[in-house]
Amino acid sequence: FLTNRFHFHWRWFWDHGSGELGAWGSQLLDVARWGLNIEWPQRVCAVSGQRVIGDEAETPDSLHVQFEGGDKTIVWEHRTWSNHAPEGRTAGVAFFGERGTLVVDRGGWKVYGQKDAAAEGASELLEPHLRNFIDCIRTRAVPVCPLETGHVSSALCHLGNIAYRIGRSMNVDPRSGAISHDADAERLARVEYRSPWTAALA
């Protein structure tokens, strides 16, 4: 019996969880994709592993994933054991440009220019996002983040985890998000159902 498999910690086991990347990734990768106007990557590579915590968990406690798409790259990093939050934010997205850097999270934003002092602003982003979702349930309107957009951001989390688990980079079809010519990766992208259960595609 492993207490680590229950309550919050169930997410650290591949049978029923997707690690820190799956827990936070879709929310943060969604913002990164929106800011860079990226749909699917062409190549995904991941490195790291169980570096510090050393418990029974299967998912990595630190991870670095690169989603490469043409001339744009999204980099995901997490260290679940670290007590130092970059830019003073426990989670967020940074856009690095030629003339400055923009850091965004649910509580606001901060811009670092090349020479100018940093500018920043605060806003509560979570409540309006939840309100939009509830309103769209009631009205049947399309939410600010459509289902298809959420699907791509969630799928990137799975692609990153698969690249980590196979231990090498993998190519992705930039039109569909399908894994290209890698039997090991394709196997991890599918779920084997126990008989008599099956998954019907709509």
Image (cartoon, grey):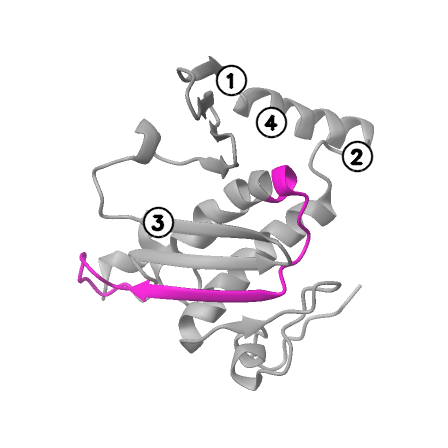
Return the x and y of residue 80 as percentages of the image width and height: 28, 48
**What's the mark number on residue 78?**
3
Return the x and y of residue 43 as percentages of the image width and height: 57, 66
- Mark 3 vs 1: CB contact within 8 A: no
Q: CA distance from mark 3 to mark 1?
A: 24 Å
Q: First in sequence: mark 4 or mark 1?
A: 1
Provide the residue span drawn in magenta.
Answer: 33-57
Return the x and y of residue 108 as percentages of the image width and height: 48, 20
Q: Is residue 193 visible?
A: no
Q: First in sequence: mark 3 or mark 1?
A: 3
- Mark 4 vs 3: CB contact within 8 A: no
- Residue at 63% over, 69% down: 172
Pair 4/3: label in front = 3
Q: CA distance from mark 4 to mark 1?
A: 11 Å
Residue 164's place in the image compared with 180, above or below, is: above
- Mark 3 vs 2: CB contact within 8 A: no
Q: Which residue is mark 2?
A: 142
Q: Nearer the viewer, residue 172 or 193?
A: 172
Residue 123's place in the image compared with 167, above or below, is: above
Helix, strand or loop at label 2? It is: loop
> Left or right: where does residue 30 sit relative to residue 48?
right
> Left or right: where does residue 131 sit relative to residue 137?
left
Q: CA distance from mark 4 to mark 3?
A: 25 Å
- Residue at 61% over, 26% down: 129
Q: Which residue is mark 4?
A: 130
Pair 4/1: label in front = 1
Q: Residues within 10 Å of mark 1 (few under 14, many from 20)?
A: few
